[in-house]
Structures are given as C-alpha cells and as structure tokens.
Image (tube, coloured by chain):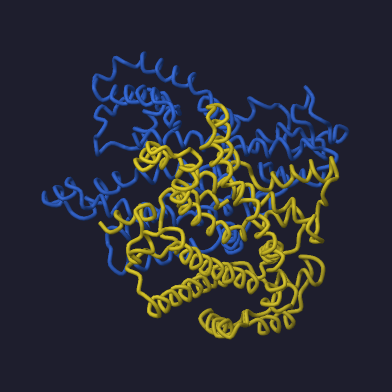
Chain colours: A blue, B yellow
Amino acid sequence: MAGSTDLADADPRGDHTDPGSRQAFTITSRPGPSHADPSGSDGGVRGSDADTDPGRRPAAGARIGPRVLLALVALVRNPGLAGSILVIGVVLAWAVVPGWFSHQNPLQGVTAQRLQAPSSRHLFGTDHLGRDLYARMVHGAALSLEATVVAVLVAVLAGAVVGTVAGYLQGWIDTALMRVMDVLLAIPGLLLALAVVSAIGFGVIHVAIAVGVVSVASYARVMRAQVLVVREVGYVEAARGGGARGARILLTHVIPNAAGPLLALAALDVGTVLLTVSALSFLGFGAEPPTPEWGALVASGEPYLYAAWWLTTFPGLTVAAVVLSTNRIARALETDSHH
Amino acid sequence: MTAFAMAREARRPRHPAGGVRPRRRGAGLHGLARRFVQVVFVVWAAFTGAFLALYRMPSDPVTLMLAQRSGGPNVVVDPAQEAALRVEYGFDQPLWRQYGTLLGRALRGDLGTSVQTGQPVRELLTDALPQTAQLTAAALLVAMPLGMAVPIASAHSRRRRIRGMLDALPAAGVSIPSFWLGILLLQALSFHWALLPATGNAGLRSLVLPAITLGLPAAAVIAQVLGRGLRSDLGSAYVELARARGASQSRIVFRHVLRNAALPALTVAGLLVANLFGGAVIVETVFARAGLGQVTVAAVTNEDLPVLLGLVVLAAMIYAVLSLLVEALYPLLDPRVRRDSGEVSRRTSGTRTQEAA
C-alpha cells in the first residue's frame, strides 16, 4: 500500500485532513480482521492498542521504521488481506507493464498451436486461433481496470455533485434531484446500464460510463446525507460567521469533510463495478473482438466449453479473484475507518 | 450485479419503499392513494427518462433495420422506403410530439410495435414475462433458504474454524461473476456428468442450473445482510438477558435475534427480486433460455427503441409493486412498525436521523 509511510495525519480526529490518506495510512498499521470476528475478545484489546498508538505520539518522521514493521506484522497475521493486496498488485502491474509479464503476442496466434491445454509454454493454454491466453489476460488487464476506474469516477463525481447540490441548496432543487435518483434506483442496474449503452453506443468506455450512471444514485444519497450533517457542524458555522462566502465554505469545509463515506463507498463499489463491466463485455457490448478484455475473453471461450475448459476458467477466475480482493481490502478500510 | 449495490443499501438501511423517505404514513384510503400516486410517478418518470435517453440517440434504428432486412450494412437503401418507415414509426416527428404520442398510447396500454420483429411490444413482453418470472421464483427458492441457512449455521457453530469458513462463503459468493458461474455449472453438470440439460426452456430440469446461477449470488447477498444483523444483535443486551435466563443458543437465534435481523434481509430480498430481472439478462444468455433477458439483449443489439422503452417501464412497475409488497409485509414481522405506524423502527431508519438533521 502506498500509504504505509504517510504519517502526515498527526491528529487522529483532525476534521480537515483528507480522509482517503488517513484510511490508507491506518489500514497497514493495524492488526486487521480479528476485529470482524466478534468472538475474540483479545482481538479487541490488541486493536485498541494500535488505535491509540499513532495519536499519542505525534512525532511522525522518526517512527517510519517501527511502523512499517508493524504493518508487516499485521499483514503476516492476516494472510487474507496480504493475499488480496498481492493480487491487486499483480493485476495492476499487468495493466501498467504487460510486456514484463508476457512476451507472447496477445493478438496474433500460431494457428498450429490452437486450443492447446495449459503447459509450461502456454501457462493458461491457447485459444481457437492459437493465441496465448495468459498473454491475452495480461494485456486485457489494462482495459478492464481502466473501465472500472472510469465507471467509479463517473459515479463518485456525478454522485458528489448531485448530492452536494441537493443537500446544500435544499428546497425544490433537492426534492427534484432526489426524485430523479429514486427513479434511477427503481430500474434494475443491468437493464439501466444496457439502456444507457444503447443510448450512447457500444464500446468499453461507453459501457464504463453506463455502469457509472447506474451507481450515481447511491453516491448522491450518501453525499446528500453527509452534506446535511456537515453544513450544521460548528466549524462551518464558524466559517460563515467569519464572513466566508458560500462557495468557499462548500469547497474548503463541507465537501472535504462530507467526502469520507463517499470514498469508503467507492472502495466497496470497485468489485461490483468490475463485475458489471465484465458482464456487459461478456454480453458483447464492450470490447471489440480482437481486443482482449476479461469479460469478453470468457464470452469468446464459451463456444469451446467442451473442448477447452481453460478458455473460460482462467479469465473468470481472475475476475473473481480481483473482485474478492478489492472487497476484502475495502472491508478492511471500512472497519478501520469505523474505529 | 446490483445485488451488491443492494447489500450496500442494506448496510445503510433505508425505508422499504425504495426511494421514498418515510414520513408519517397516512392511515387508510388517504395513505393508499398516496402510495398509488408514488407508483404512478415512478413509472411515469422511468418512461420519460428512458424516452429522453433513447429517442435522442445519435444512431438510427430505421437505417439499421433496413440494412438487416436487406442482408448487409452496405446495401443502398431506397430513400422512399426509408421515409415511409420513418413515418410509420413516427421517427420523422419532432421529439416532443413523439413523446406525446407515445405517452398517450402507453396510457392506453399500447407500447407500440417492435422495430425489429413488427410484433406489438406488449405482446412481446407478456410472452416473455412468465419464463423470467418462473426463473426468478426458482432462483428465490434457492436464494432464500441458502441465504438464511449459512449465517444461522454460523451463529450456531462453536468451532471457530467452521464459523470462519461459513462467514467467508457470502463474501466469495458475491465476488463470482454470474456469467462465469453459469458456465462452470454447465461445464460440470451438463457436459462432464451429463446430469442436467444445458439449454432451453423445456421442463423443470432445464430450470435447475439457471436458477442456481441466478440464486447463488442473491443468496450470498442475503447471507451477508442477515449475518451482519445476527452478529451485531448477538452481542446486544437483550441477548445477554435471554442467555442469563437460561435460553439455549437456538432459542436465542430463532426466537429473538432472527426476527430482528430478518427485517433488513427482507428488504434486500424484495430488492433482489426486482433485480433478478436484470440478472436474468445474463443467465438467459448463458443458458440460451427464452425470456425477458433475451428480449433485452436483442433489443439492445438491434437498437429496438420501443421494446427498450417497454422493458424499462415494465421494470419500474415491477419494482414499485414489489416495494409496496415488502412494505406491507413489514408490520407483520415487526410489532414496532405496527404499534406506531408513523415511526419506523430504529433498525430500519439508520439514515433518517441524518436526513432529518
């Protein structure tokens, strides 16, 4: 995790710090999932130790060493979380530098080697055109992850804007906006995404936008609820009393402090979004055929189900592993931010 | 799919009537009338939103249809024929007039005709609905018992390892792509062991695999919500009291905790049914079953606007009716809702205090 050395947050209750970095920082320094387990009373004790620890000693710079050690110990104690971080790390590396992981061409196959079972030469086997499945999965990672990120960004940004406007302005604008969000929630997500895709066209990025639109409503609701709370809090009152204008209050006080739960929600949403994006690709509305993308890979392997089990198994397994890992990490972030 | 969105929604519990924030519920006819107005509003808004999104789109269904009828995208199309078709479907009219015509027809129950097949949309949907309803019911039969059994078993088990394994199941269940799950089941049970038919709509046996594929992720969501409720309630004061009075673990779980924890799970189950309809898109594609999912995929592929519009309206209607049903079930399960019909119980109104602030 990038945040393991981020020690800027000396005051654990600091209202004006960026919640994202705080979460990223605390996750590695805590014992982990023993909290989720209600039985272990000793787990609670250990957790509270780690919790109070960073706050009591504000001298940050000197303690990087022990803290990293603590993080490592936490990860060793918690192999599930460590494995999840490893999976995400590998997949991200696939996306960024695919060439390091696979030297075979993902688009051009060797026809003589088609539908070969997994072997040392072709780790995950080859497809009906003799293309190496592992290479295609490595090169497909970028597209799948890009679509996921775009979808989450669309949802978070649009949801934040709608929620903030509704919560801050209130009145009929609030009512109208939230009614629209209610209607978005009333249509099954996949159907809504498909309707949006047919409105804006096929293709991976369009699919990603559609999936983002589907989740806007939940973000807007959460953001609105947060803004309603935050705008009444003391420091906002103080800023208003100090003569700050509305826009400034909104940008510097309300939005940064209301955004925390939104980011936690976004972390939880990453897995879902990846599932939906790959489902739409599986249905054939995402990547164009030669381009590798995980959902599309499963679809292209489906006709060879009987002859070549590996064509559907490995891409599907990868999606499942990535979703499981992001959910696991998000859950750790969430339990962490609650303590 | 959105099953997860729902687990999330359930984590921040909200009122069962979907988006409708709880107000003091009117009693009797007045309340009923308002409910009806809400349903009508949701369906109308879905219709309008879908119309605006779909009928303003850049691509042109008429050209697409002509190209398909004559067997290729590069065929030269007779302009007179194209114009005639445009007039036939009303695509030549200004947008607001198209909207007026369509809305007027829809109010009379006429959803237009499919651009692709020429069939009336209503007929198309009513033909497909029973297949998908069957699938959804079967999936719910898988999802409800399984989604309840896993957390209950976990609450009962004394061994940490078994409990840990049971608690890990739902998290794994929501992470599996349903299209892949269907393919795995096909591979194992139809191809490898030849136990069940792979495709088609014939008979109960062909329903088993699709129902499992659709039901397992739903079960995982229910198990997550129920398990969270069980875990938090098992540590509460009233459980301590019951235990101190000598109640057995199963009495505590079934008599006390489950009744409390079942409420959010019920909400989720209701939403799941509304959304299983979306999940059917994938399952029906994998198993080549006829139904609303297939209709949807065909409509999207061919940009069949009237059919898409009809599907969105139908989905909104199903959702509105289901949320009413779930809401009607609430007082039966929770005496607190019955007692003061305006005040929703503490457990179900997590976000309300914030919203009221």
The extreme right residue here reads A112
Picture coordinates of residue B233, whole percent (x, y): 41, 42
**Residue B249, placed above or below residue B67:** above
The extreme front residue here reads B246
Going 79% across and 34% down the picture, which residue do you hit? A126
Going 51% across and 67% down the picture, which residue do you hit? B325
Within the image, what quadrant is residue B204 found in? Answer: bottom right
Picture coordinates of residue B6, whole percent (x, y): 50, 52
**Residue A181, placed above or below residue A9:** below
Picture coordinates of residue B130, whole percent (x, y): 70, 68
Quarter of the image where the C terminus of chain B is located: bottom left
Left or right: where does residue B151 sit relative to residue A127? Answer: left
Task: Decide which of A181, B163 is in the foreground and name it.
Answer: B163
Task: Tell me how many marks there are.
Answer: 0
The extreme left residue here reads A242
Task: Decide which of B198, B98 is in the foreground and name it.
Answer: B198
Going 84% across and 41% down the picture, which residue do you hit? B193
Going 69% across and 49% down the picture, which residue do you hit? B212
Look at the image and tell me whether residue A277 can be seen: no
Left or right: where does residue A320 sit relative to residue A231? Answer: right
